[in-house]
Amino acid sequence: MGGHGSGRRPTSSGKATTEDSTPLDVRRLAKAGALAPGRVVSWQWTINDRVHSTIQIRAERGLVTLSYSNRPRGGSPDAISQLVDVVATPGTLGGQRSWFACPGCRTRVAVIYGAGQLFACRQCKGLAYTSQSEQADDRAARRANRIRKRLCWPVGIFNPCREKPKGMHWQTYWRLRAKHDRLVMVSLEGMSQRLGTMKQSLNAIDRRMAERR
């Protein structure tokens, strides 16, 4: 996988974030049928439609085996094979709901993260949610990028908008487009305010330095 969590950005508290890790969601695996005993699937993570990490998942009754490679900084790739228990509880509308048993603390969780050599829950990995430390304009940009992914557009609010995805209803497209544009405006306004504050601070520093001459 070229190293789980490589290039992770710390928050203001110094913690890395879940957004910059490789999350493995048991609900998505169940929906894809990847938890059926005997099933083997290749799971991928993408950025801007480009695959940046891949993992093989082999399902057995009550557990999955995660197989991938990890490259330590400055070292050669290591082949990793990790067993993760899968437990089931009754669903609220009948049937069963699957959970991971965190390999670190054994807590029942829906998502484990590949930040580091092995997968574990957010608490074991010391990961923070991006929303815990982000500014309002950052949050708006993140939500806009989420819409861009639904619309099959390149991530990044400065990238141009594209046409309606094939198969999407026009009403849905225009609703998402309007929400996206509002979020972009909020993000740009916040960026402008922060740049203005930064400029004022720099001007104040220049004035103080000029007074000392």
Image: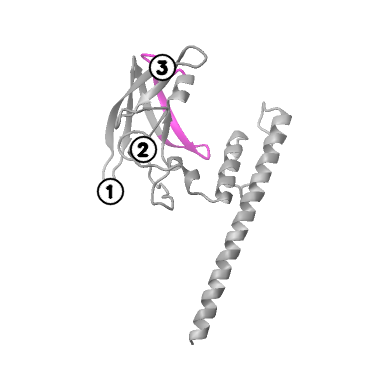
* Local SS, label 3: strand
User: In the rendered view, does 115 fall on the left or right side of 93?
Assistant: left
What range is drawn magenta here?
33-53
Which badge, 3 or 1, is on the more N-terminal residue?
Answer: 1
Residue 135 screen position, x and y as percent: 54, 51
Work out whether 150 lies above or below 131: above
Choose top left, top right, bottom left or bottom right for residue 77: top left
- Residue to which mark 3 is pinned: 89
Q: Is residue 52 magenta?
A: yes
Foreground pick, 172 / 122? 122
Q: Nearer the viewer, residue 174 or 70?
A: 174
Question: Does label 1 or label 2 sit earlier along the sequence?
Answer: 1
Residue 148 screen position, x and y as percent = 60, 39
- CA gap between label 1 and label 2 equals 27 Å
Are circles 3 and 2 on residues that touch, CB within 8 Å? no
Q: Is residue 176 above or below residue 73?
A: above
In this view, which residue lies farthest toward the top? 95
